[in-house]
Image: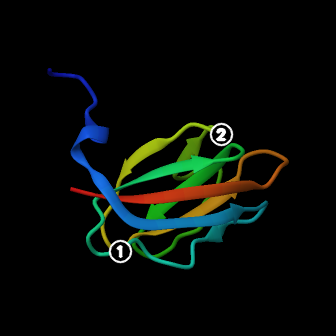
Amino acid sequence: TIGVNKMGDLYRLNNFNYTFTALSTSVTLGDAISAGCNAIIINASEPVFIKITKHGDAATSGSGGYFIKDWPHYIRVSGGDQIAGLRAGGTNSVVYITELTE
């Protein structure tokens, strides 16, 4: 059906999962997204700003995206992308990332 988001039906788990804690200053995930990855699921324990770039640019409140807590977000990515996070409130946020592939 046109207009229906079927992203969850198009991808499989890629068997790579990452966790990091977003602090009051930007934190970049130590691992880049793997070569075969086409999308990720991001979930966080507290609201967080996320920035995804090839060069590991810092996340700021004015760049990237704002992600609410406890809600999985599906995002298209490319292999080699780097993910940075910045807490959006007064509490650090544990960020969970699961890689997906076609």
Residue type at mark 1: give it.
Answer: Ser
Q: Is residue 49 visible?
A: yes
Reading the image, the residue beneath label 2 is 69
Q: Which numbered tag is attached to residue 34?
A: 1
Residue 9's place in the image compared with 79, above or below, is above
Q: Return the residue nearer the eye: 49 or 39.
A: 39
Q: Is residue 62 visible?
A: no
27 relative position to 91: left or right: left
**Secondary structure under the numbered disc 2 in the rendered image:** loop
How many neighbours does mark 1 have within 10 angstroms: few (below 14), some (14-19), or many (20 or more)? some
Q: Are marks 2 and 1 in contact (CB under 8 Å)?
A: no
Q: Which numbered tag is attached to residue 78?
A: none
Q: Residue 50, image x and y in percent?
A: 56, 54
**Secondary structure under the numbered disc 1 in the rendered image:** loop
Q: Residue at x 39, y 70 (%)?
A: 81
Q: Return the residue nearer the eye: 48 or 10.
A: 10
How far, Cα to Cα, is label 2 from label 1? Answer: 25 Å
Q: Residue 24, image x and y in percent?
A: 79, 60
82 relative position to 10: left or right: right
Residue type at mark 2: give it.
Answer: Lys
Q: Residue 13, image x and y in percent?
A: 34, 57
Q: Residue 37, image x and y in percent?
A: 30, 65
Residue 47's place in the image compared with 63, above or below, is above
Q: Residue at x 40, y 71 (%)?
A: 33
Displayed quadrant of residue 71? top right
How many neighbours does mark 2 have within 10 angstroms: few (below 14), some (14-19), or many (20 or more)? some
Q: Residue at x 28, y 53 (%)?
A: 12
Which badge, 2 or 1, comes first in the chain's sequence? 1
